[in-house]
Image (tube, rainbow, N blue to C red):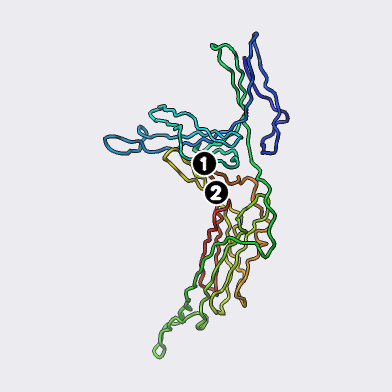
Amino acid sequence: MSVRIVLQNPRSLYTNLDFLKGKVILSLTSNETIAAITVKLEGESKSRLLGEAFNPYGGYRRGRDTATVEAEVHKLPFNNSCADSQSTYMNVAGVQVQAPGNTDRHVRQTLPPSLHGFNEQAIIRYYIKATVQRPAFYKENYRTEYAFQFFPIEPPRPPLPPPDQRRESYARIEHSFAPTSAPASTAKPGLFRKASVPQPDGSGVTPPQICIDARLPDPAIITCNEPLPLRIMVTKVNDSPATVFLQLLQIELVAKTSVRAHHLSRINLTSTVILSKSNMRFHLLENKKLMEIDKGLWRDIPLPNSVAPSFDTCNIARSYDLHVKVGLQHGSGDHVFVRLRSHPLP
């Protein structure tokens, strides 16, 4: 006897607005008595980390023979509750694997998307499970699973407030350019001529002091396939007449995936470069005190749809930071690279 699940119009990706329809097909070689067929929609959040094993004679040691793999398995049923698997212990090639059954942290939020990677440290999977129950106690029940990729869709957002009531989240940094010196003359000193002494560049022009703001709407939310709602403001704090140029601009989205297994934890970082430009030599502050960098540089570069949404489960969580790197220059000599980090993006 074999059991398999066949879906109608199968797809590579499902959302929380889709319907799953299909059949459970039984292949029998003889007559069978079946009590019931149960079909469930389930999800699991698995985490596994390598830690140090305790040696009673020498404290904690790390090595192939003493390494401990600690794992957590949390069920993600669609009623938004959480259930842990029972504790299990096993030795595989001298490595002890532990799956604790009780934890003191349970998260009840929107279901996370399917997740694979990080050398199997973090796995979130969804599947349809069919169980064929047979009434005889000495006969085993037949089970099968059909795995699929799940990607949640966020609920509708409230309408935006009027423009005069909107708020922004921002990251700010200030920098003062150091005064530069003109290069010394290459002529050698003569009998009646003294050696030249380097003079300040710009005939005593005060170097500018600038302030850079990276701003996002509050709450800071970035959506795939939509323009980045970012504003970069450059302000000249002092009264320097020097001109400020934009030399470099890089915008990068950094994903932080936090994995927890019992008392172990680890953060994995991945990045997506949205924009990277250099040698721009773009005039910013010539006769102005405040200027906004042209949003057209990144307006037509939407966030790719391969970026998964933020989520938080009992043992795996993901959040995002937006890194903005700005390179400024005044005159022809001095330059500074300013790296801004915005607030975590939900």
Image spot of residue 288 (x, y percent): 62, 76
- Kindly indicate whether the residue at mark 2 contacts the one at mark 1 (C-beta within 8 angstroms): no
Who is closer to the viewer here, 301 or 313?
313
Where's residue 71, x and y in %?
A: 46, 34
Q: Residues within 10 Å of mark 2 (few under 14, many from 20)?
A: some
Residue positioned 54% across, 62% down in the render: 171
The residue identified by callout 2 is: 319
Q: Secondary structure at mark 2?
A: strand
- Horizontal side, residue 144 vs residue 49: left or right: right
Residue placed furthest toward the top: 30
**Residue depicted at x 62% and y 18%:** 132
- In this view, the residue farthest toward the bottom is 192
Alpha carbons under labels 1 and 2: distance apart: 11 Å
Which is nearer the eye, 241 or 228?
228
Q: Is residue 115 left or right of residue 56?
A: right
- Under mark 2, the amino acid is Ser
